[in-house]
Image: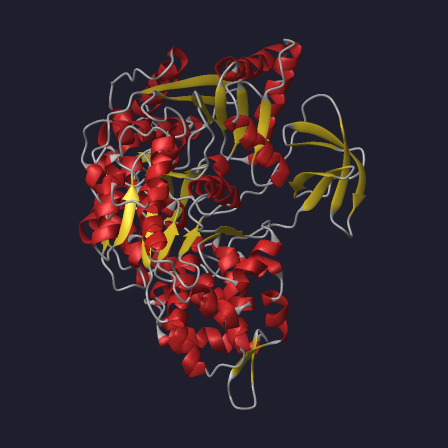
Amino acid sequence: MSESVFNRFAPFIRDYIYSHKWEELHEIQVAAANIIFDTEYNLLLTSGTASGKTEAAFLPVLTQLWENPSGSVGVLYVSPLKALINDQFERLEELLEEADIPVTKWHGDASPSKKKRLLQTPRGVMQTTPESLESLLIRNSAGINRLFSDLRFVIIDEVHYFMDGDRGLQLLSILERLQRIIGYEPRRIGLSATLGDPTNAEKWLSMGTSAECVTPKVTEKSRKVRLSVDFFPIAEKIPQKDSKVLLDNYYSYLYKITSGKRCILFSNSKGEVEENIGHLKRISAEKHGRDVYLVHHANVSPALREFAEERMRGGELPVCTGATVTLELGIDLGHLERIVQTGCPLTVSGFVQRLGRTGRRGGTGEMYFAFRQDMSVPQNLFYKDINWDFVMCIAQILLYTREKWVEPMYLPKMPFSMLYHQTMAIMASSGSVQPRDLARQILTLNVFSDISKDDYLLLLRHLLENEHLERSEDGGLLIGKKGEGIVNNYEFLAVFSVPLEFTVRQGSEVIGTVQNPFPPKSQFALAGQPWEVTELDKKELIIYVKKIEGVSANMWTDTGNEYVHTMVMKKILEIIQSDEEYMFLSASAKKRLSDIRMLCRNADYSDDFSDKMIEDKTHGERMVLPISDSGFAVFPFLGTRGTMALLYALRERGFRAEVYLSKYIPICIEVTTDRGKQTLINALNEIKANGADKYKFTIPDNCEIAGKFNDYIPRGLLKKQYIEDYLDTDDLANIE
């Protein structure tokens, strides 16, 4: 153990380390302590799961708080999930038991009496979410300075999760507004398990502060991983005995690899989670096995989610929990033996995060992937017969295991939905504000640094015309009639969209929520259990249910923008071109990959056309395949933003073009033209060589990046955001 760092910790921390029989401090803990004790830098801690990042931040921070007690809340811990707050609360409470440093949870489910006590006597550590912090700034603005007047540190957990969405922009805006209220900049510490190049994350973490951000370089211990990818051909559209057998083979495999294990079964949709767990329960019952199958996603009630977390933490008995992203983050789930994923993780970052849930503290990480594809009705175009997410999964595995590459985070320039939200939030906490003062408050926030005064003036005029704002007698701005209804709704605090949902109850017990108003006698699945509706109360948005036997289906509308990076698309191309066999593929998966490679190599759609997709041609020839008399498929192998830019560049040159997406993966651009293949190739070569001016593109009026408050923003601004943040013309140089 590094004695010099250990001896600098507060006595209660040294006692904690001794009582828990730590043999040594991790390298990241030593590095973090030296930076926190000896510098004024902001700090980004990024390393593998269970490497001690949380302790690396808190041990020196709490030492400083113990040595020099703060006159207000001293440490603000911000998390994306209430469950993560609850998990960290238990760890901190034990650590601080003898230190007289209180820890207070501050979110919607936290104790009102403890919140009141903190407001009366602010001190110690406060744990919260961006939404709860926003609520404080709006509804208790007069007390904010007293609550945080001596705030020393802001610790942001799961930085990578915040960076890639509006919640992160909201958090940065809130922190900068808080700094203005208290008159100084508390130090920031970010924790993340899945970052490649930390440059963007450092920039994000320090946004709105004058301090430099540093990331200590630590030696990542080599870690063994065991990976397996299996593939199951299904014939769902052919109602015959064999099709049922094929589907049963898939679920039997899931049962086999989860049975007797402590594991998480990840899927990308809540509906698939429910379907998988429903079938595993059925198989287990048929084999007279124990029911060890649980469900954890956002629509399951908090009580049932907490029950699943406790089951996974406690003891060594087998348990399998079906989950979406809610168990991807750093909640302590004890010893997990295996991760199973149906389908492909959405990103390399997601793959790494999920893999990191197993094999903690030097053990072997295990992750099994299972794919199924309905192959009963072959498509007429070869690329529509390929399950590209299967190939993308292989690409993700290779990018991380061989190159340690993870997607860099993108910092948007025109977040107009957030601009509306923060404008209304500041108005709600301020009363009447002169337009010039409001513009100065908003546009000097770093997240809006690329938005012009003219664009902001356009937004304010639009809000006045639509009664979201109104003029006061002295010419100031007030929240208008329609704006009051929006700001006073509790859903305003969250910048992510939440669809209308019905609460599902069995008697007095809340099971969770669903989006569909299922009528009486209908059946659906929730929390891994099939239900039958006994009563529907549309006025109160409640569905009363009773338990039934069998397997039922349910669907949710999953919102959000999914982007594929160009590096992933290039790796997909490399895999298709290669003859390499990958050891982590099962025999069935190897055969499927071989079939996919053959499909691509044999692509030929006219008697006089002999180009093959994989042959060593010039980039223009290789990327264009005829698919009809006047139709061509262009395969640029660019990421989402680059592919969309190429689409508009081709349209600008008179080609009729549409992007073909396999799920959300940009496979090709389908082009219709009577000017011939060579003209199209020439255009592509010219675009690759010279790029394109995206500001000259003709963009349809309905194009926009999804945002919760888009309905309140002028259409011209949404189009401007789409051009700036959704189209990457710099990527056109990477056209194949």
Give 508 or 51, whichever is nearer the viewer.
51
> Image check: 161 left or right of 213?
right
Front residue of 339/22: it is 22
According to the image, what is the colour scheme of the structure? Answer: secondary structure
612 vs 703: above or below:
above
| Residue 592, image x, y percentages | 39, 18
Residue 175 place in picture, x, y as percent: 40, 62
Q: Is residue 682 left or right of residue 604?
A: left
Which residue is at a point 77% across and 39% down the rendered structure image?
A: 508
State whether residue 609 appears in this view.
Answer: no
Residue 260's place in the image compared with 42, above or below, is above
Q: Position of residue 466 (x, y in %)?
A: 58, 74
Q: Quadrant of residue 482?
A: bottom right
On screen, 653 above or below 367?
A: below
Residue 382 against residue 305 in the figure, above or below: above
How many numbered marks, from 0 up?
0
Q: Which of the 4 quarters of the picture holds residue 196?
A: top left
* Residue 337 falls in image quadrant: top left
Is residue 295 visible from the viewing direction of this image? Answer: yes
In terms of depth relative to the viewer, which is nearer, 410 or 654?
410
On the rendered structure, is 247 left or right of 360? right
In this rendering, would 388 be left or right of 471?
left
